[in-house]
Structures are given as structure tokens and as C-alpha cells.
Amino acid sequence: MAYIGEIAALFTSFCWTLSSIGFSKSIQQVGPQITNRVRVFLAMLALIIINLVLYGQPIPLHAGISRWAWLSISGIIGLSLGDAFLFQAYREIGPRLGLLLLSLTPVFGTTIAWIFFGQILTLLQIVGIIVTLAGISWVVMVQPEEDDDNTRKATWRGVLFGTLAALGQAIGLVFSQQGMTGDFSPFAGTLIRMIAAVVTLWIVASFQRQAETTITTMRERPRTLGWVAFGALFGPVIGVSSSLLAVQHTGIGVASTLLALPPVFMLPISYFVFKERFGWQAIGGTLLAVAGVTLLFLN
């Protein structure tokens, strides 16, 4: 199927837009660390069931040592560390600046893929990436007309967390692509990544004596658990699986750029669901980002 990688990346961005709603609600109620631990655990359980139903095997033990290594490292760096930094950035500087810094992912991803794996972009792809990033940056820098987030200022901690989140996501994508060679199932690949993330986060939580606190907190807040489950379904389960399909069939630079579109997809949701109103700058940034995506498809 033509453009399957690009289509998968766009679908991933849409799923991640939905997941951000659930995770934002949870972070407000129980904080970023508990949200991160619970979401990867719920996602792992869902993926085990999916793999059992689709392939008759709950865990892809047949994947081979090399594939397990690439995808496990990807899960630790991208899902454990990268997303942990992203959630901390949201807390420090808010989602607007956090998403702006996350737009650095394509720059990091393309550079890493070029240096270590020899992936070269065409001139049209480079222009498309630059135009898309410009549109994304424009969108996330524009605030709704009545948004208290205008008072949020960038702090060095917040900028550091946001930059590390982008770097973690980029490295995770590059490693995922190496582990997804051939026709390996995206659901199986996502499960391997999720297992590595669960083991890492919950071992750290145990050493910090936060594991029991996490379980107790979620038991006392079933509504929050529902928000985490909603975010986990569209984020780590469907979204991450779709992102692996994307890196299977297109380059890191193109995939990571299309995966950076959630701020753009968030505009109509904010308009129709949250009744927020945006000026011409947000519309202009959206159109610019769409133009960049079109250039990527025309390559």
C-alpha cells in the first residue's frame, strides 16, 4: 500500500492527541510519575491480550535476541525516560512550551539516523520537514484568547525536560526502526517496548518505595484510573503500535515530523469540545503545517 508509513504516522498523531486529554486529566489529579507507571502497565496488559487473540501467543518469544534488544532499549529510552521527561515538562512549563520543545524530535531523529545509519533525506523531504516544524511551532506558540497559560514562563528545568523528552522520543524511534525490520507485527513490537518500560519504571518505583503508593492511589481514584486507561488505549497501545508501523515503511525524518502533529490536531478538539477560540495565527500555523505534510507526501 502506497504511503502506508506516512498514513500510519498521521493516524498516530491523531491517537496521541486523544491520549493527551486522558493523561492531562490524570497528571492534574495524581501527578506525572504515577500516571506514567500506570499507563505503561495497563498498556502492557492490553497488548498481551491483543497478541494472544491475533497471534495465539501472548508474548512474542520467537522474535529473536537482536529484535528484543533493539525494541527493549527503545522502550526504556522512549517510553520510560522520554515520556517521563515530557510529563515533567508539562508540569514545569505547561503543555504549550512542552509541545514546542517536543517539535525538536524530527531534528534529533534525522540527525541520529543520518550519523549512525546513513539515512539520507531528499531536498523535498528536508523542505517539508522545515515547513511542517514551522507550522507546528507557530500553532503551539499561539494561546487561546482566554487562556491562563499566558502567564507561564520558560524555566531552565522545564526547557531541559522538554529537550530531553524530544531527544528520548527521537532515540526511541531510531531504535524501534532497527527492531522492526521485515514484516514483524507492530503490536508485538509495541509489547516488547512496553514490557521493557514496565520493568524499568516499576523497579525504580520499588527502590523509591513508591510502588505501593501508586497502587493505593489508583485504587482510591477509580475515575482517574479511567482517564489513564483512555490515554493508554489511544497512546501506548494503538498510537505506539501505529508509530512502529510508520517507521517500518518510511524514514525517521518523515515519520518523526508527522508524529509531531498532535498540537495541530488539538485545534479542532479545543474549538468544538473545549469551546476555545483561536486567532488567525493558529489557523495560519495549521495551514503551514498541512502544507509541509503535503510536501512529504509528494516526495
Image (cartoon, rainbow, N blue to C red):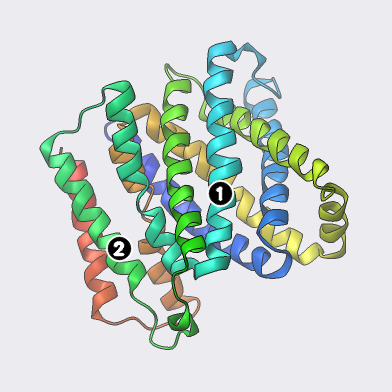
Please state the horizontal and vertical placement of residue 229, each as a whole percent of the image. Answer: 69, 54
Q: Where is residue 57 in the image (x, y as percent from the top left)?
A: 69, 20
| Relative to 127, residue 48 above or below | above
Residue 19 seen: no
Which residue appears at 19% of the width and 33% of the height?
A: 121
Q: Mark 2 points at which residue?
A: 137
Q: Where is residue 166 in the image (x, y as percent from the top left)?
A: 43, 48
Seen in the picture, residue 42 relative to 217 is either above or below; the reply is above
288 vs 168, left or right, is: left
Q: In which quarter of the image is residue 115?
A: top left
- Is residue 107 at least partly visible in the picture? yes
Circle 1: element type: helix
* Residue occupying image coordinates x 34% and y 81%: 278
Q: Where residue 83 is drawn, which disc sits there?
A: 1
User: Looking at the image, which is closer to me, 289 or 121?
Assistant: 121
* Quadrant including the C terminus: top left
Is 293 placed left or right of 232 in the picture?
Answer: left
Q: In this view, does 284 lie to the left or right of 251?
A: left
At label 1, the amino acid type is Asp
The extreme front residue here reads: 156
Question: What residue sits 48% from the left and 35% below the top?
Answer: 172
